[in-house]
Amino acid sequence: MNNNNALIDSHVHFFTTEDLTALGADLPYALPDANPLTEYLALLASNGLKPVLLNNVHLSILPDSANVFSSFEELARLQVAHPGKYDHVRLVGTIKADPEYANEQRLGHRQVVGIRIVLHDAPPQSVAADAYSTTAWMALYERLAPHQHVHVYAQSAETNLRVLRQIPPRVRVVIDHLGTCHAHEGAHAPAFLALLDAARERGNVWFKGPGYRTAIEIAQVVPFVSRIVDALGADKLLLQASDAPHVGADSHGNGYSDLFDPVGVFDFVRQLANAASECCNATADDLLHGAAPIVFPNQ
């Protein structure tokens, strides 16, 4: 893999078996395997990969983001126990977007970079006109620091759009999985184009990868990447992400965890970036991680 010294994972979930013990049976996907930070770093190291930035994103099946804060402590312990070995790793976190949970104290943690709204396959009509613009939500947006963002995940482009329109224009937003998991609708689908138009009008919206949830075939994902770059510029795209431990399945029922591991995903996004760069006015590295300093600025 090229340019390893700039390797980032803009979307990964670190949690332990203990974090899963209190979960019920009614889950949106099969119970994932634990993905502790220490084991993840060991896996990458064994393949010659040294990430410089990791974003531990709220896992939707967990009731809170205690695992995110635990990972901060885990890395700190590793850095003390192994001087020099992990000093290159910067770990940040995105916590649960809930007006009660995301309080001033949690948002005030120096490693918290944002909050995550998770809607999975929620249809557009399920998003009420004031679902994310109530008094409580507006107070939450006010608590966000200028460098923090709202991370939105919905499989439908129109659902993403309905949420985006309710978030105050001054708030930075990151749209998950290239804005759509419905590759069959095409990169010229009206809802997807409307989402890009709204993002361009705001000027503070970024789209992130890894792209395999849009489609596992790179040729099917490239048009979406190209459309985002054409509409917003390469500085509004961040492809390099693993989304480990790869929960859920594609439209054909293929389990993502059977198709990918973190190392394989980094190969996937590199191939995607290489292919997209041939039809975009941007290098593969621009598409992979060029926007990282803007999305995850040092504070």
Image (cartoon, grey):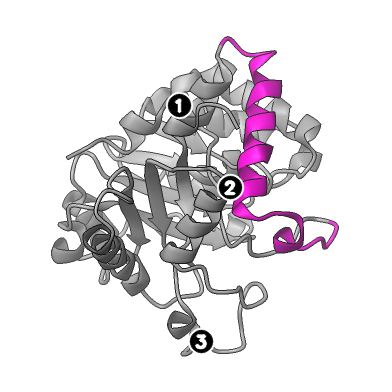
Q: Mark number for residue 23?
A: 3
Q: How dense is the environment of label 3, judged by Cα within 10 Å: few (below 14), some, or many (20 and up)?
A: few
Image depth: mark 2 or mark 1 in front: 2
Distance CA(mark 3)–CA(mark 1): 36 Å
**Label 1: which secondary element:** helix
Considering the image in quadrants, where does the N terminus appear? top right
Q: Quadrant of the C terminus?
A: top left
Q: Residues within 10 Å of mark 1 (few under 14, many from 20)?
A: many
| Amino acid found under the numbered disc labelled 1 | Lys
Name which residue lies at 32% across and 51% down: 86
Tag 3: residue type? Leu
The quarter holding residue 297 reads top left
User: Which sits earlier in the primary sequence, circle 2 or circle 3?
Assistant: 3
| Left or right: 47 in relation to 198 | right
Q: Is residue 254 magenta?
A: yes
Residue at image location 42% in from the left, 57% down from the top: 57
Instruction: Mark 2 or mark 1: name the one nearer the start of the chain.
Output: 2
Question: Where is mark 1, residue-wise?
Answer: 236
Mark 2 and mark 3: Cα distance apart in space: 33 Å
Residue identifier under label 2? 47
Disc 2, disc 1: CB below 8 Å? Answer: no
Residue 80 at x, y percent in the picture: 21, 61
Tell me, yes or no, whether the highlighted magenta stretch contains residue 12: no
Label 2 vs label 3, nearer the camera: 2
| The magenta segment | 252-281
